Image: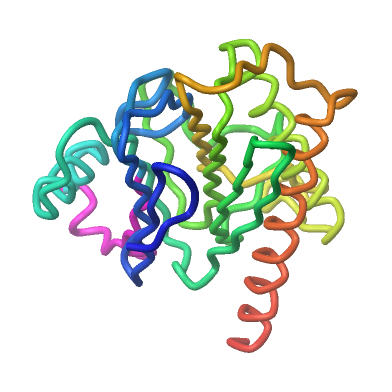
Amino acid sequence: MKPLSDHVYLDHTPDHIHIEFTCPHTVMSSAVLNGGIVRADHIINLRVPKHIPPSMESALEPPETTLERYCDQHNWKGTTVGMMTAASMNSLRISADRMEDIEIIALVTSGLSNPLRAGDPAKCRNLEDRAGGAGTVNAILLTTACLKPAAMVEAIMIATEAKAAAFQLFDIRSRVSNKVATGTGTDAIALACRPDSYEIKYCGKHLIFGELIGRLMMETLTSTIRWELERNNEQK
């Protein structure tokens, strides 16, 4: 593993992106494993097969079970926030910046086979249904600051706006409505911050912290989306 920041290490393999904290961090996420707000020791972005034979779909285990088993196999102790993607781990792009003693790092992987626009008709028509889909944009934001819960929500909101702006920049179209997509149907995001550090109460676009979040997300998103589009064109 290589150091990313104070108390944060990265392991990047063809099968996963693994973030390990040497001290528990506060993580807010939409992850399938330990989503919500938790104190976490790890974040993982796990690569899964893009195509599942129809004969095997009924035997698939819940995604959180797959992630828990993967963590056990690697002997990762403590709480892991886990997300999944069928995107290539080669799509990973990382951007970082520092303001005074505060550092922000954005890590993004991208798959674009499942683009949708917010408000498109949903495939799953029951509230209990699980969403499927291979093309996913997964983002991990790390900061050495201590964000209050409202600031964490603002940071995720700005990151999501950046994703919609990046999809607009590349004119990526929804596979349902053919309007400009705002993401994919299975995107996930995790934001991790230090609980014992400099406190950030607000993170709007009028503030430098919000500006850094938006800019770093745009840098990583445009880089990884460009890589994915070029790869798709080469495969045609």
14 is higher (above) or lower (below) than 38? below
The relative height of residue 76 versus residue 33 in the rendered view (above or below) is below
Residue 9: percent from the left, percent from the top? 38, 52
Q: Position of residue 66 (x, y in %)?
A: 19, 46
| Image x and y of residue 198, in percent | 60, 21
Q: Is residue 47 magenta?
A: yes
State the image quarter where residue 213 is shown.
top right
Residue 101 in which image quadrant? top right
State left or right for residue 155 relative to residue 92: right
At x 54% / y 58%, what residue is drawn?
109
Residue segment shown in magenta: 44-59
Q: Position of residue 122 (x, y in %)?
A: 57, 33
* Left or right: 111 in relation to 81: right
- Residue at (42% x, 23% y) in the render: 26
Q: Nearer the viewer, residue 181 or 127?
A: 181
Quarter of the picture holding the C terminus: bottom right
How many dots with numbers?
Answer: 0
Q: Nearer the viewer, residue 26 or 98?
A: 98
Residue furthest front in the image: 101
